[in-house]
Amino acid sequence: MTHAWRDTISLTGEQRLVRDSIRDLCSDFDAAYWREADRSETYPSEFVDALADHGWLGILVPEEYGGAGMSTSEVVVMMEEIAASGGGFSAPQAIHGGIYNSVPLVKYASEELKSELLPRVASGEASIQSFGLTEPNAGSNSTAIETRAERTDDGDAYMINGQKIWISRVDQSDYILLMARTTPQEEVEKSTRGISMFLVDLADAYEQDGLEIEAIDKTASGFVHSFEMWFSDLRVPAENLIGEEGRGFYQVLDGLNEERLVIAAECVGLGEAALERAIDYANDREVFGRPIGANQAIQHPIAEAYARVLAAKQLVYAAAEELDDTDQKDAGARANVAKYLAADAAFKAADAAVQTHGGFGVAREYDVERYFREARLTRLVPITQQLALNYLGETVLGLPRSY
Ligand SMILES: Cc1cc2nc3c(=O)[nH]c(=O)nc-3n(C[C@H](O)[C@H](O)[C@H](O)COP(=O)(O)OP(=O)(O)OC[C@H]3O[C@@H](n4cnc5c(N)ncnc54)[C@H](O)[C@@H]3O)c2cc1C
């Protein structure tokens, strides 16, 4: 995509480098590539390999461990660009975990584990694509997770038992960052305590017969597979505990705002991809002897969606840029506002694009139906729009807690 209307925000030199490099790389993966990946629900391995070959999977890994040592300001550009190139929300989602799961490792893993694993993550040789939090009985109430990790009698390991649901990219990952209770909820003062983070080697888990998985049949983001997982007496070495026992939930919260901004950037990119298609079709398609874009009923929803997408984009970029100088609470406010507005903007853009295409709005050939399915999904993940509003109502505006 080369439209000038996308490039109105001023970028730093490094952001410009990221934008131009990713734009160039993505030009090798056209609309037909993503359409086929979506139709056949096939993981876009060629695309991910191309990113890995150019070192992009290590964008957040510090230089001392072989990565690019960049920050969220650059990742938002990268992910927006991938989505806007025509990959939609699913394309950045194909690598999202691989990039963000390195963050808690950098912050909390032992030096030994970091030196062993992070260079391999940066080169694309090893992947930590999966993050396992959600459970059937917990959902949005994530501290209600029941999966247990109990220290073995010899103290050398933890035994993991429980169930997870909706865990993405397990089939494309060497490791999963798994959240499990080391102390039952009834025995902790606050529900956020007693949860720990583990690095689980998936090949070892299958070998032990300690893990079974089953893919969930879904209608959006089909080429990024999500799974139900069952853990039974899975032995995980004690050195694979990441950070402090019982503090895992706080370790997740620590990187949450950054990650949420990146999700918002992916929504912005999706909205831009949808807008581009809408604009092209509105200019090209003639009915009643003139381009349909001359009708305000077509033009205004597109222009309105553009205004919303641009507003969300400005918020995302500014919040990412100022992240280091913002306290946790303000960063949380901005990240939740950004995710909420960007998901809604993407939805409005995709809806306008479908309507603009008339009957072809549901033809796979024009891609906007895929963007629409994905835009709907962005209002559900990684947290629902309601939960983002709950955060704003309670934490920012001082309204009573609703749950
Ligand atoms: C495609 C996909 C990929 C995913 N990938 C991962 C992954 O890799 N790892 C992972 O851990 N999880 C993953 N998830 C899970 C995702 O984070 C959850 O689906 C999401 O957090 C919502 O939880 P839930 O589905 O259990 O909905 P529920 O919590 O059951 O909520 C159902 C509805 O009730 C609303 N609701 C619930 N409580 C309240 C309240 N107090 N106030 C207002 N509204 C409320 C919700 O907003 C929602 O609309 C994925 C989900 C999907 C669909």
Image: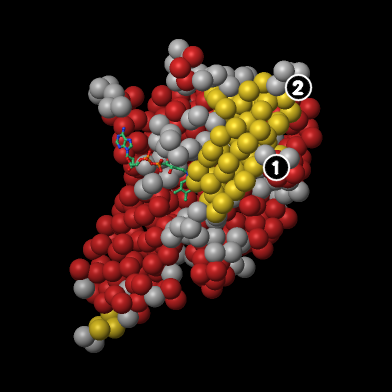
The residue carrying mark 2 is: 156
Indicate the quadrant containing the C terminus: top left, top right, bottom left or bottom right: top left
The percent coordinates of residue 113 (x first, y second) are 75, 30
SS class of the residue under badge 2? loop
Q: Is residue 376 above or below residue 208?
A: below
Q: How many marks?
A: 2
Closest to the observer: 161 or 82? Answer: 161
Between discs 1 and 2, the one toward the N terminus? 2
Does the beta carbon of the residue at mark 1 sit less than 8 Å from ligand 1? no
Q: Amino acid at mark 2?
A: Asp
**Mark 2 residue crowding within 10 angstroms, few (<14) / some (14–19) / many (20+):** few
Where disc 1 sits, the SS reads loop
Q: Is residue 62 above or below residue 399?
A: below
User: Where's residue 195, x and y in %?
Assistant: 54, 24
Asked whether the viewer can see residue 58, the reply is: no
Report, in whole angstroms, how far the alpha carbon at label 1 lies from the one at label 2. 19 Å
Q: Quadrant of residue 359?
A: bottom left
**Where does the image place residue 367, in percent across and percent down from the top left?**
43, 69
Q: Amino acid at mark 1?
A: Asp
Where residue 21 sits, quadrant-wise, is: bottom right
- Asked whether residue 153 is in view, the answer is yes
The residue lying at 47 percent from left, 45 percent from top is: 263
Closer mark to the observer between disc 1 and disc 2: 1
Q: Which residue is depicted at the point 25% across and 84% down?
A: 287
Q: Residue at x 59, y 64 (%)?
A: 42
Left or right: 363 as drawn, with respect to 58:
left
Say which residue appears at 24% left-offset and 69% top-offset: 298
Which residue is labeled 1 in the image? 209
Q: By what rule are the colours in the image chosen?
A: secondary structure
Point out the quarter of the image occupied by ligand 1: top left
User: In this rendering, would 294 be left or right of 371?
Assistant: left
